[in-house]
Every structure is written in structure tokens, then in C-alpha cells.
Amino acid sequence: MDAEGYIGEYTQQLDPKGRVVFPVRFRDTMTERERREGFYLTKWLDGSLALYPYPEWLRVREKVKRLGKMDPKYRHFVRTFNSKAREITLDGQGRIKIPEVHKEIGSISKEVVFVGMGEYVELWSPEKFGSYEEYHAPDYDKIGEEIFFGPDEVPVEEGASESGAAERGSEDSP
């Protein structure tokens, strides 16, 4: 994948055989090696599926391997994450086939929403993705402010300074 990674959101139709065109924008991002090696599809978070290019899959698997196998919650995650993983390749028309088990997990029937997450792609049913976005919409600004400005900083408009604002305030006062 190029430096930009997988970004954007694309909705594609499933054909009767469970195949879907992998978005052109994402295909353009892939390296020749990634085209040859393909992807791994597995159950992911929030009701979605994750589609990892093979090199990223290896990195994620290393993280999963380090989870404590004696802790039942991690054991369950590892078991599900690995048991639902399937190798996926692009066909000659740039399509992927979504296995039945994954269509069931993701509640995918007629359409698939591809969501670029940088290093990997999430697959969603349009209904689940719409509900997810609606539910989390109120948090977007708050989280964005924490990420970009820190929890204790108040954003100041570019070009404005505290002393300049104080000076303007004193000029306007009678």
C-alpha cells in the first residue's frame, strides 16, 4: 500500500455469487506484492469485518499472539479472531468473494460499505455503518478536540493571540 494507505468510504453491490468489486481507489493503493499475496478477512469490532493486506495481517497476528492465553476474555478474542479468518484474493475483475459466514457476521446482504482505515479496510452493512455513525456523531468533535488540542487546551483561531484579544477588547470598551 502506498504511504497514504486505505482512506475513503465506498459502497459496492454484491453480485449473486457473493462477490463485490474492491474499490478502484483501494486497488490503486495496493503494491504488486499485496496484489499477489492478497488479504485476510476476519470478524472485527463494532459489528464490522476487517480486511487486512497480508503484510499488515502478519503484524496484527503478532499482537494477537502476545495476548495472555490464561485470561478468558483474551482467549475468547483470539479464538474468534483466528477461527473467523479467511484468505481472500482479488479475481481478474478486481472482485473479492465474501464467504457466507462473514456475510452473516456483518449482516451483509446486497451492499457492502468499504471504509478505509489506513493500514486495513473495514467492511460494513450499510445499515450497521449508518447506525454506528449516527450513534457516535455527537462524540466526533469532542474526541477530535482531545486528539488535536489535548484535553486541557482550548483551540485559538490562527492569527489570534491572548494579548491581541485583550487589546481588542480594551479598544472596544468605552
Image: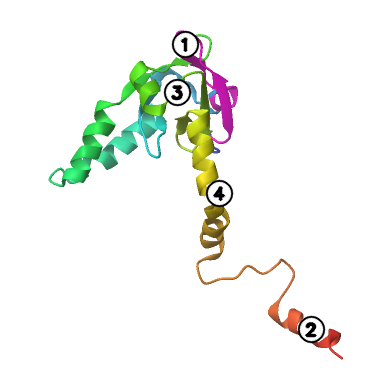
Q: Earlier in the sequence, mark 2 or mark 4?
A: 4
Whether residue 137 is in magenta: the answer is no
Q: Which mark is residue 108?
A: 3
Residue that mark 1 sits on: 91
* Mark 2 vs mark 4: in front: 4
- Residue 98 image offset from top left, x and y in percent: 41, 18
- Rendered image quadrant of residue 70: top left
Q: Which mark is residue 137?
A: 4
Three-letter amino acid code at disc 4? Ala
Magenta segment, which residues?
6-26
Three-letter amino acid code at disc 2? Gly
- Residue 11 image offset from top left, x and y in percent: 57, 25
With 161 as the anchor, is 48 left or right in this view? left
Q: Earlier in the sequence, mark 1 or mark 3?
A: 1
Give the residue drawn at x 55%, y 38%: 4
Residue positioned most to the right? 174
Q: Earlier in the sequence, mark 2 or mark 1?
A: 1
Residue that mark 2 sits on: 169
